[in-house]
Image: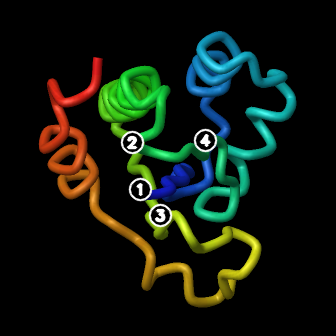
Amino acid sequence: MSKISIASAVPTNDLEIAKFLHQRFKMSLTGSQKKLSMGDRGFFYTCDLYGNDHVERETDIRDIISFFSGKKNPLLFLEIDDDQDWGDLDPDNLSEFSISEEEMINTLNSSKGLYE
């Protein structure tokens, strides 16, 4: 199992993106704006993949990718193993856990149809 965390790769104050996070994930509008303004330090979505709720998490991630892509706003994806904890990561070396959007999509595509 993998753990995924997502942030905007660059700081943004785009109100439409903040509204998307607010409406789609029930985040406060102010909280969404703060996370987005932090750029690659403002992780707004974290989940475990391949659990009982994998289909829902896959949909969430694909929706995030689609919306941010439409806004031409790059994303930062971090992936760690199930036995790792986010709090144990060195904030100055997060790049070693970074994966590209293409890798994230490939990960989701590789499990398509395996979970119902």
Mark 3, residue position: 78
Q: Residues within 10 Å of mark 1 (few under 14, many from 20)?
A: few
Q: Residues within 10 Å of mark 2 (few under 14, many from 20)?
A: some
Q: Are marks 2 and 3 in contact (CB under 8 Å)?
A: no
Q: CA distance from mark 3 to mark 4?
A: 11 Å
Query: What amino acid is labelled 3 in the image?
Result: Leu
Q: Residue at x 36, y 30 (%)?
A: 58
Image location of residue 87, percent across then percent down: 76, 73
Work out whether mark 3 precedes mark 1 in sequence or the reverse, and give the earlier one: 1
Q: Are marks 1 and 4 in contact (CB under 8 Å)?
A: no
Query: What amino acid is labelled 4 in the image?
Result: Tyr
Query: What amino acid is labelled 1 in the image?
Result: Met
Q: Residue at x 43, y 44 (%)?
A: 49
Residue 64, compared with residue 78, is above or below; it is above
**Mark carried by residue 45:** 4
Image location of residue 82, percent across then percent down: 52, 63
Q: Secondary structure at mark 3?
A: strand
